[in-house]
Image (cartoon, rainbow, N blue to C red):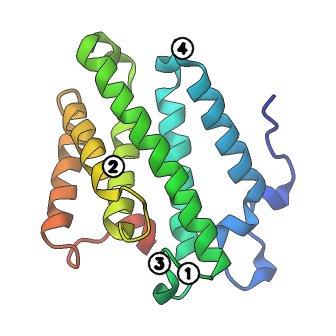
Amino acid sequence: MLKIPTSEKALSPSLESGAPDSLAEHFVELDIAIRSLVEAMVLQASRWGDFFECFATCTCLLLFLYCRQLRTVDSTTIHAATSDVTALKAIAGLNFTIRIIADTTTDLNDQLARRPHLLASCSPLTPYSAYHCLMVLSNFEHVIPDADARFHAIFSSLHFFAKRWNVAGQLVLKVESFLASPDSVQWCFMNE
């Protein structure tokens, strides 16, 4: 059974730490609860359509936490062979989240190709999950295994979502704009 963290410390960053951006270490219980919830949703394959919005929200939150955690480390330590424990934890968390988004969006696209009526139960949160995942892959492709293949699979999903929601089409354009000129486009998870 999923245990939702109830302690205030688990839900709020410590003001005494001196590092307000180092969210992951102060949100350990929340991280564990979100991962458990994501796992529980994935294991409910027969009811998967019931969980799209919750899944997308959870994965976006995990991406946010880990990207913010990477902001607290020296950017030169963000590489696959780093010895920086904070960077390693954030990279591992991003890899977990990206892997599960890639797998589920690919699975969702396969299901939707066979049964398009399932798209009706999705909400625009689902494309946002794909969009944020694409931006993480674009910014951290050097530390995420199979980043290129995952990027293309998720980008294909986002294009498919654009058939249903105009916002997904706008997100496709934002990704394309970022890819064309990465230095001129700001992405909120790393800059807020």
Question: Mark 1 Cα within 10 Å, few/some/many (few <14, many 20+)?
Answer: few
State the residue position of label 4.
Answer: 47
Q: 10 Å neighbourhood of mark 2: few (<14), some, or many (≥20)? A: many
Q: Earlier in the sequence, mark 3 or mark 4?
A: 4
Name the residue located 52 percent from the left edge and 45 percent from the top edge.
Answer: 59
The numbered mark, 1 or 4, whose residue comes first in the sequence reads 4
Q: To which residue does mark 1 refer?
A: 82
Q: Which picture quadrant has residue 157? A: top left
- Note whether 12 is above or below 169 in the view shown: below
Q: Name the outermost residue toward the left.
A: 180
Q: CA distance from mark 2 to mark 4?
A: 25 Å
Whole-percent x, y for residue 41 in the image: 60, 27
The reply to whether discs 3 and 4 touch (Cβ–Cβ < 8 Å) is no
Earlier sequence position, callout 2 versus callout 4? 4
Instruction: Tell me the distance, in whole angstroms, between the alpha carbons under discs 1 and 2.
Output: 22 Å
Q: Is residue 178 above or below residue 106?
A: below
Residue at which label 3 appears: 79
**What's the CA distance linking mark 3 and mark 1?**
5 Å
Q: Are marks 3 and 2 in contact (CB under 8 Å)?
A: no
Q: Which residue is mark 2?
A: 150
CA distance separating discs 1 and 4: 40 Å
Residue type at mark 1: give it.
Answer: Thr
Real-space Cα distance between discs 3 and 4? 38 Å
Amino acid type assigned to the residue bearing label 3 in the image: His
Q: Amino acid at mark 2?
A: Arg
**In the displayed structure, does residue 160 sit left or right of residue 187?**
left
